[in-house]
Every structure is written in structure tokens, then in C-alpha cells.
Amino acid sequence: MKRQALQVAALQNGTVIDHIPSAKLFQVISLLHLERERSAVTIGYNLKSQKMGHKSIIKIADKFFSDDEINQLSVVAPNVTLSVIRDYEVVEKKEVRMPEELIGIVHCDNHKCITNNEPMQTRFHFLGAERGTLQCHYCNREIKLSDVKLVTKIK
Amino acid sequence: MESRSLVTIANHSRQKIEYLIRMAQEFEKHPNRRLLEGRIVATLFFEPSTRTRLSFETAANRLGAKVIGFADPKVTSGTKGETLKDTIMMVSNYADIIVMRHHLEGAAQYASEVSPVPIVNAGDGANQHPSQTMLDLYTIYQTQGTLENLNIYLVGDLKYGRTVHSLLTAMRHFSPTFHFIAPDELAMPEHYKMYCREKGIKYVEHQDFDADTIAGADILYMTRVQRERFTDLDEYERVKDRYLLKKKMLSKAKPNMKILHPLPRVNEIEYSIDDTPYAYYFQQARNGLYARQAILCDTLGITLEEIINDKIIIK
């Protein structure tokens, strides 16, 4: 193995999330609740990447995510790649898909929306890739995917 | 539990709209009934709206229900920091149905998700006001004998005007042609025009507001151009008089043409028009009673058949 081949240690069992835009790393961490994780989490920040210039990577030992959990990432980092590792081998690759509904993740930017004034979770519907927007279930405000902000406290 | 709440009529089918119009017709024939005797209707107005509240309360009273509630948010615990959910849960212990008006958008949807009793949205901020739309549809049907293939002119504030947006959405089933007449700053938002194109609704945008422009109208729906909507007050001064309806502009109107307005009117319809056969805004307001009687009954699970067969009519 070439010395520069691996910038972050290999994983025996777990999940590798690669190609995270570095600016989105901390949002990915909070969406997946990794701050509460008890097993080993290795984070590579601002690594060199041929495709992206710079990227970030997260390796979580002994952790396997459901599709629903992974799809939460679609609002911040839709192009990440996930590899499921068992016994040092990649046994499955997963892509992020936008779910039809996002609950408790996206902040509604309409300050007159009920979700910004009651202790409650936000709820958004994805209106399709062509339209490229999310619509608030409550106030009907449409938000472009590129303008999405996350709720400050993810429940 | 299946919720019978009425939050919006944007998703109502053509059949459902026609069904509610049939119900309203029954109430126009005989508004005084005992269909809701023994029921309690709560009217919670977190934002004052005298017109809408009186209309709902009259509808409830004429159907024999009793009414509880508040007309002014200053008297509620909301001012002490109580959440909407807590207020709704408390009132739902007392009432069979809650009619609510709120300044926050999405409030009625949220209330309908937490409330054990049905919610009727009497306006949530700039979002939805389904009973207004229902009375508009009823009035259009009443004056034209149909909802099909009409030329509907929307005039004034088409940007913030909740009533015109809801009307546009609800009319999609009936092949209308819409005509938009508004100052640039208050023009119909692009996403509503996109909606029209997606749904195959024809629309025309007009620069002028004069006798020739409106000669083809079946319905002339006026709204108020409000000063506070303008960021550029010079612009307001330039356009404010351009969207006032004057009597002489009706010289080429079709005989069936009716002028509607959600009220309150300030000066956007010249007062001398009130005496012409085209003026219909006061009858429109009265139709609010019948439309709201239909909404209360439907929301409480009373069917059209029961209303038609109801023999207890109070003269």
C-alpha cells in the first residue's frame, strides 16, 4: 500500500461516509446525531480530493444506518457516498435519496409560520427534482433546496 | 380518527365543491334550522375579525347551536405565554367544533393535527381562508348559474391577496379564463402563474383598467391596493388611483357581469356603483352566512340529504 493512499485509518466494521463537502461536515454530524455516538468515530476534515478539491469523510465503527437516516442527509449533502464495511470489505454502497417528507430537520424561513412560534417539529414536502423546492406542510412556503437552513436544535 | 377539519379547500375535488354549493343553496332557501341544536361551537379569534366572526356566529346561531369563544386575543392566556396547542386542548373539552382565526400561517393545520374535535379555519395569516373562497364560489355560481368557462377579472393587490389566490386554485376544475390587472409591485406572483400553466388554466395580463379591458368580464373581483404593501411610496402615489373602479367604466359591461369584493371596501369601487345591477358585494357578504352554515354542517358530519330532508324549519 502506498503511504499516502489512506488519509484516515481503515475500518473493520461500520459505515464510511465519503465526499462530504467540508462546509457541510458539521451539519452531517448533527443530522446523524454522531455527537451522541459511543463507538469510535473518525473524522477527516479538509482532506485532499481529486474530484472535489477538498472533502471531508466520516468513519463510524460498528454502526449501520437505515435508509431513512441516510436520506436525511439529502438536504445538506446530496452527493455523499456511503459504504457499508464488513471485515474490511465494502459490502454495499448506498446513495442518498431525497425523502418525500422531512420532519424536524428543515427550518421554515417564514417567521410568521406556526412552526417558528410553537414548540413543535417542522414538516416539509419535497416537490420533485424538477422544481427543486421543499414546501412547508403548515404555511405552504416553498424553499429552494439551495437555500435550505436546518433547524437549530434537531430533536 | 378521521379528521373532518376544514383547513383549506385547495385540495377539494370538483364534486366536493359542488356538494357544498348544493348545501349552501338549501340554507339560502331556509336559513333558520335546528340541525345543530345541542351542539356547542367555539369561535377562537386569536386575531380580531369582526366580519368573519359575526358571520360564523350567525351561521351557528341560525342552526340552533350555542356559541362560546373570544373575539379578542388580549383576553386569552396566549398573552400569558400559553401555546396554541394548550388552548385548543382546553377548548376541545367544551366544544364540538372549533372555528379559529389566527395571525400565524399554518396555525389551523397544526390545530387540526392536535385537536380531538374538528377545526374550521377562519383565516390563518396570509395563508388560507376557505370559508371566504367558498362564499366566493357560491356567489359566482349564484350569479352566473354555472362555474364553467367564465371570464374572471382579478383587480388590485394580486400579490398579497389571499382571497384571489384561493379563488384561482379552487376554480381550476371549471375551465376559467383569468384576467390579471395589478400594479407591477402587486402583480400575480410567478408561482401562481406557473400553477395556472401546470393546470391548464388560461390567463391574460392587462396593463390598462378601463371600459374596453373589462368588457368581456363575467366576474370583476376587486381588491384593495394598500399603501403599506409598497416599498416605494412614490410608486404607490403613481398607481393608487389607476385601480379604482368608476361607474363610467361599466359602459361596455356584459349584462350578466357582477362586481365582487371581499370587503371592507375603502374607495376602490365608486359609491355610485352600489345602485347599479352590477354591484353584488353586499349579497356576496350575505352568502357568507349560507356558505358557513354548509361548512359547519359538513364538518360536523351532517349530510346534504339530511339537510334536504330536514323538516324543522323555523319561519
Image (spheres, rainbow, N blue to C red):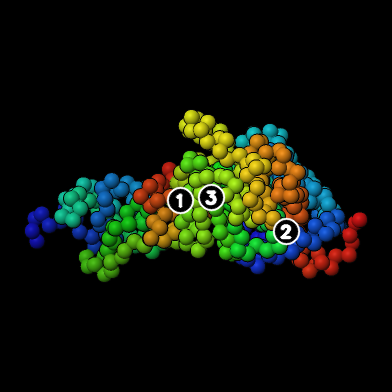
Query: Mark 3 vs mark 1: which is more N-terminal?
Result: 3
Instruction: Tell me which residue sits at (56%, 59%) in the image.
Output: B177
Q: Which mark is residue B142?
A: 2
Seen in the picture, residue B170 relative to B222 is either above or below; the reply is below
Q: Subunit of mark 1?
A: B
Instruction: Tell me which residue sits at (60%, 55%) in the image.
Output: B216
Q: Position of residue A24 (x, y in %)?
A: 30, 48
Residue pointed to by mark 3: B180
Q: Disc 3 marks which amino acid?
A: Phe
Q: Position of residue A123 (x, y in %)?
A: 50, 53
Q: Position of residue B137 (x, y in %)?
A: 67, 57
Residue pointed to by mark 1: B190
Label 2 vs label 1, nearer the camera: 2
Residue B266 in sight: yes
Mark 2: secondary structure? helix
| Residue that extends furthest to the left in the rendered view of this protein | A2
Q: Quadrant of residue B126?
A: top right
Q: Residues within 10 Å of mark 1 (few under 14, many from 20)?
A: few
Q: Disc 1 marks which amino acid?
A: Glu
Label 3 vs label 1, nearer the camera: 3
Seen in the picture, residue B241 relative to B313 is either above or below; the reply is above
Q: CA gap, disc 3 to disc 1?
A: 12 Å
